[in-house]
Amino acid sequence: MKSPRYNDVSENPQTILRRHSRYSLPIPIDLIIEILLRLPLNSIARCRCVSELLASILVHPDFTDSFLASSLARP
């Protein structure tokens, strides 16, 4: 059995989406990222378990940097 590629941080969201082309996403990947950025940390942790696509997005350094910056800006 092939192990999931959760920690491949060299990919950008568009590359991740192409790798998961079997998924039909009615929502653009950029909008998915914006939605994820608004979630609290415990929900982000749960989303990692939902799918390989979400896990790949959530461990990407660009997402983590954006998430930390936006969470620090929240009241």
Image (tube, rainbow, N blue to C red):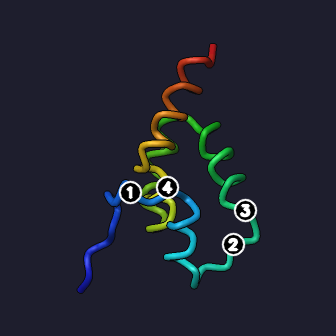
Left or right: residue 33 versus residue 66 is: right
Q: Is residue 14 above or below residue 42?
A: below
Task: Give the residue pinned by disc 1.
Answer: 10
Q: Do the residues labelled 4 and 3 touch (CB within 8 Å)?
A: no
Q: Position of residue 12 (x, y in %)?
A: 50, 57
Q: What residue type is labelled 3?
A: Pro
- In this view of the protein, which residue sits in the foreground, 9 or 24? 9
Task: Give the residue pinned by disc 3.
Answer: 28
Labels 1 and 4: the sequence-earlier one: 1
Q: Are marks 3 and 1 in contact (CB under 8 Å)?
A: no
Task: Give the residue displayed 46% in from the left and 50% down from the top.
Answer: 58
Q: Where is residue 52 in the image (x, y as percent from the top left)?
A: 44, 68
The residues bearing labels 2 and 3 have C-alpha atoms spaced at a distance of 7 Å
Q: Position of residue 53 (x, y in %)?
A: 50, 66
For label 3, the SS is loop
Q: Is residue 63 above or below residue 3?
A: above
Q: Residue furthest right?
A: 26
Labels 1 and 2: the sequence-earlier one: 1
Task: Give the residue pinned by disc 4.
Answer: 57
For label 1, the SS is loop
- In this view of the protein, which residue sits in the foreground, 58 or 42? 58
For label 4, the SS is helix
Q: Do the residues labelled 2 and 3 touch (CB within 8 Å)?
A: yes
Task: Give the residue pinned by disc 2.
Answer: 25
